[in-house]
Amino acid sequence: MFVNKVPNNYMSMHSMGLAYLKDSEGGDYPNNTAPGQASPFVATEAVAPGECVVYKWLVQNGAGPGPTEVTKAHAYHSYVTFQRDSNAGLIGPSYVYRRGEMEQITSTYREFPILYMNVNEDNSWLSALNQGIDVTDPAPTNTGGNYSIWHPQEVNIASSGHGGSTFMAMNGYILSNNPTFEMCYDDKVIWYVYAYGSASHVFHMHGNGFSYGGVGRAVLSK
C-alpha cells in the first residue's frame, strides 16, 4: 500500500527484481505504440498527491535467496520521471527472505542497507520546493490523447532545474553525517549494498571481516 504525502508532485513504486503485471509496474508511459491512439491512465503509474494505491509484486524463484544466502536484495524507485524522482530520494531497498524464515532471520541478524549515489539537487523536483517556487499545475505542452499520462511528468519536470549542487552521498547523507551503523561484538550483520548512477563505488570495511557469496574475507586492518 503506497500513499503519496508529497504536496505537489507525482510518484510511483517500480520494483527492480520482482515480477508484476502492467497495473503494478509503476511506470508512467502509454501502453501502446500506435500514433494518435490513447492509452487508459492507471492510478498506480503516477500516484497523485494525497492518493493511495496498492501494488502487487510477485516473488519468483529466481528472486529469492541462493543456496549460500539468507536473504536477497532488490530495489525500488519511483518511475514517473526517473532521474528527477530518484534525485528527490524516491529510491530504496526491498528484501526477500528464505521461505518461512523471515522472523527467525530478522531476529538473528542486524540489517543495514547502504546506497551509494551522486545526488543532483538541480535534477530533483524538490529544487522548486526548496526555492519556494509554485509549479503545482504548469501549462500543458502535450494535449494529445495521452495527456493524463504525460501531465504527471510535466509537473515533475517543471519542478526541477531550479538550482542546487551535486553531492556524493551514502543513504542520501553527505560529509559523513549519516546515522552511525551500530552493532555489538559478535553480532551477525547483513549489509545490503546498492549503487545507482554512472559512478563506480566499492564497499570497503576497516577492521572487520565479512563474507560475500559464502566466501570469507580476512580482517583488513586493526
Image: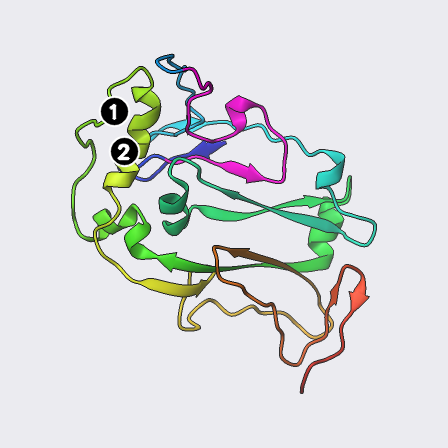
Going by the image, does 208 lie left or right of 151?
Answer: right
Crowd class of label 2 (few under 14; some 14 to 19; many from 20; radius 10 Å):
many
Most extreme residue toward the front is 35
Amino acid type, mark 1: Asn
Most extreme residue toward the top is 37
Amino acid type, mark 2: Glu
Dominant SS of magenta comes to loop
Across and down, in percent, residue 158 comes to: 23, 40
Q: Is residue 49 visible?
A: no
Secondary structure type for disc 1: loop
Considering depth in this image, is 32 or 153 the residue closer to the camera? Answer: 32
Residue at x 76%, y 73% (from the top left corner): 217
Residue at x 44%, y 40% (from the top left corner): 78
Across and down, in percent, residue 13 comes to: 48, 36
Identify the residue under disc 2.
Answer: 154
Q: Is residue 56 visible?
A: yes
Secondary structure type for disc 2: helix
Q: What is the span of residues highlighted in magenta in the rendered image? A: 11-34
Identify the residue under disc 1.
Answer: 142
Residue at x 18%, y 52% (from the top left corner): 131
Contact (CB < 8 A) between labels 2 and 1? yes
